[in-house]
Amino acid sequence: MRIAMISEHASPLAVLGGEDAGGQNTHVAELSTALADAGHDVHVYTRRDDGTLPLHVPVRPGVTVVHVPAGPPDTVPKDQLLPYMPEFSRWLVEAWEGDGWLPEVVHAHFWMSGLAGLTAGRKLGLPVVLTYHALGTVKRRYQGARDTSPPRRVDYERALGRSVDRVIAQSGDEVRELARMGIPRSRMSVIPSGVDLTAFAPTGPVVPGDRRRVLSVGRLVERKGFGDVIRAMRLVPDAECVVVGGPPHRQLDTDPEARRLTDLIAECGLTDRVRLAGAVPREEMPAWYRSADVLVAAPWYEPFGLTPLEAMACGVPVVGTAVGGLTDTVVPGLTGDLVPARDPRSLGAAVQRLLTDRVRRTAYATAALDRARTRYSWQRTADQMADVYAAVSRVTEPSRVVA
């Protein structure tokens, strides 16, 4: 099957760790690869943000990244990309009509990709699938006035959910949120992200350390809860905490969030036990996970959350906040523990309890590895997604178009 992935701001070729480069980039890259392994032909359409980028970049057999010339060929924050979506959509229509490669299904990732993909898909009679990756209602709930999303984002997301042929929700929590928005459950399929079980495994190199290690991984944005992790470490003596993510280590001093966290580390008196490692090449991440006694994921909200899965695939237990996709991937009392978000005291107590109980930690690690392997392989995700593509491609009367 020929599959068009639309990912307007999240290129699978991007270096992870920046403000707008994270889980969606990985999801699109890994899903495209798994689909290609299953024999599908995937083109990933992402906005050209550098004038030197070639139009087509063959990534591997069956996967090609296409840089769409929509808007300026420069980096633009994703919340400022909406005005360029009509141009993005027009380019897709012209390309699909003119270059001999016409997709059989369009899979849009994120709501703005949904607008571009749905408009182009309907003009050519193509079925359209949408994965939101994040919802404006949730972002507004937690960020309030600091939410920089376009004002009509929630309206667009609601209309898209009622217009595309299928919505792919990544967790039960997202299903409930979408239902509250008025999107029919019958339009949804729940298909979680996967994890690369070849790269992320319990055996292999380990980053050395002298103490028990608490690891936390992600982009350095406030909602990821690294401040809560740092405060929690006051309750976890005799252990170190390493935060991996953000800009390269040599550039941490120029990053506002990194500076805020560094100041907090000093304020908490933890400079000898807590450090920011900065960005780490993806191929080195398994060694970091394997070096940890526990992975702590403490976001205030999280649509899915890939880092807990990566840790679990390396045989590392997880202490996380009971939000979003973590409530599906982490089974309390079996693969890890969940605590309320923005509660450093509960977080620290849970981490300390696990670090001092080797038997429980080993049992959690074993169960975490088994859960990652049996439920979250990218092959399983791709197989489920292909079933959805096959189902929607048989739809003869597309849903109405977003106004």
Image: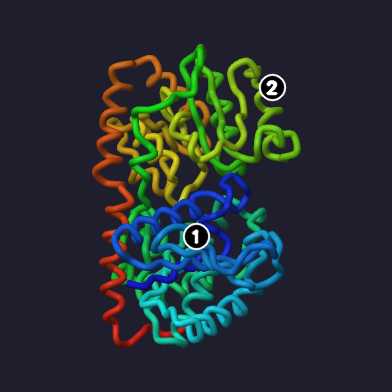
Q: Is residue 182 something one can see in this rendering?
A: no
The image shows residue 265 at horizontal and vertical percentages of 65, 24
The quarter of the picture where residue 61 lies is bottom left
Above or below, comparing residue 359 to residue 294 in the picture? above
The quarter of the picture where residue 351 lies is top left
Q: Which residue is mark 1?
A: 135
Above or below, comparing residue 175 to residue 376 in the picture? below
Give the left or right position of residue 80, taking residue 391 as reference: right
* Of residues 194 and 286, the one drawn nearer to the viewer in this rendering: 286
- Identified by mark 2, the residue type is Ala
Q: Is residue 309 something one can see in this rendering?
A: yes
The image shows residue 321 at horizontal and vertical percentages of 44, 38
Residue positioned 47% across, 78% down in the render: 118
The circle on residue 108 is: none
Above or below, comparing residue 315 to residue 77 in the picture? above
Q: Residues within 10 Å of mark 2 (few under 14, many from 20)?
A: few
The circle on residue 266 is: 2
Total numbered circles? 2
Secondary structure under badge 1? loop
Residue positioned 49% across, 28% down in the render: 215
Q: Quadrant of the N terminus?
A: bottom left
Secondary structure under badge 2? helix
- Identified by mark 1, the residue type is Leu
Which badge, 1 or 2, comes first in the chain's sequence?
Answer: 1
Residue positioned 43% across, 35% down in the render: 320
